[in-house]
C-alpha cells in the first residue's frame, strides 16, 4: 500500500474496526430506544463526545450507559465495568472544565 505509513495504516484499521463493532453490536438509535444488551467493545476515550444514562427503574429492562461518539454512533455499555466508570469520570471532568 504505497503512500501509507505504518502508523496511518494501523490507525485507519483501528477506526474501521471500531465502526464495525459499533454498527453491528447493540445500540440505541435515540433516547427513546432501550438498550437490550451491552456492546463488548471497549471504546477509546478520545472517541467519546458524551453519554446518556438508561435506568432499569424507568422504561427499559437493563441499566446501561449509552456512549455517544464524535462520529455520531451510539453504543450501549455496562455501567458496572471499570473502564466505563473511568470514561464517565473523564467525561464529567471534561464537562466541569468547560463550564468554568
Image: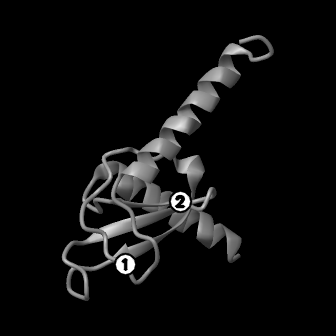
Image point 61% across, 63% down: which residue?
94
User: Do labels 2 and 1 touch, CB within 8 Å?
Assistant: no
Secondary structure found at label 1: loop
Image point 53% across, 59% down: which residue?
73
Secondary structure found at label 2: loop
Q: Is residue 77 above or below residue 15?
A: below
Res. 73 mark: 2
Name which of mark 2 and mark 1 comes first in the sequence: 1
Residue 35 screen position, x and y as percent: 30, 69
| Quarter of the image with the N terminus in it | top right
- Of 61 and 81, the residue lying toward us: 61
Residue 36 screen position, x and y as percent: 24, 67
Image point 75% across, 17% down: which residue?
4
- Left or right, 85 with respect to 88, comes to left
| Quarter of the image with the C terminus in it | bottom right
Image point 65% across, 22% down: which residue?
9
Residue named by callout 1: 33
Where is residue 38, by image quadrant? Answer: bottom left
Q: Is residue 68 above or below residue 13?
A: below
Which colour style is shown?
Answer: one colour
Res. 41 mark: none
Amino acid at each position: 500500500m504505497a503512500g501509507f505509513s505504518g502508523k496511518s495504516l494501523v490507525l485507519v484499521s483501528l477506526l474501521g474496526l471500531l465502526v464495525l463493532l459499533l454498527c453491528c453490536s447493540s445500540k440505541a438509535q435515540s433516547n427513546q430506544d432501550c438498550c437490550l444488551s451491552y456492546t463488548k467493545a471497549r471504546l477509546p476515550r478520545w472517541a467519546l463526545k458524551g453519554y446518556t444514562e438508561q435506568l432499569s427503574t424507568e422504561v427499559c429492562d437493563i441499566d446501561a450507559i449509552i456512549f455517544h461518539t464524535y462520529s455520531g454512533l451510539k453504543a450501549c455499555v455496562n455501567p458496572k465495568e471499570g473502564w466505563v466508570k473511568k470514561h464517565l469520570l473523564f467525561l464529567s471532568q471534561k464537562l466541569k472544565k468547560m463550564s468554568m
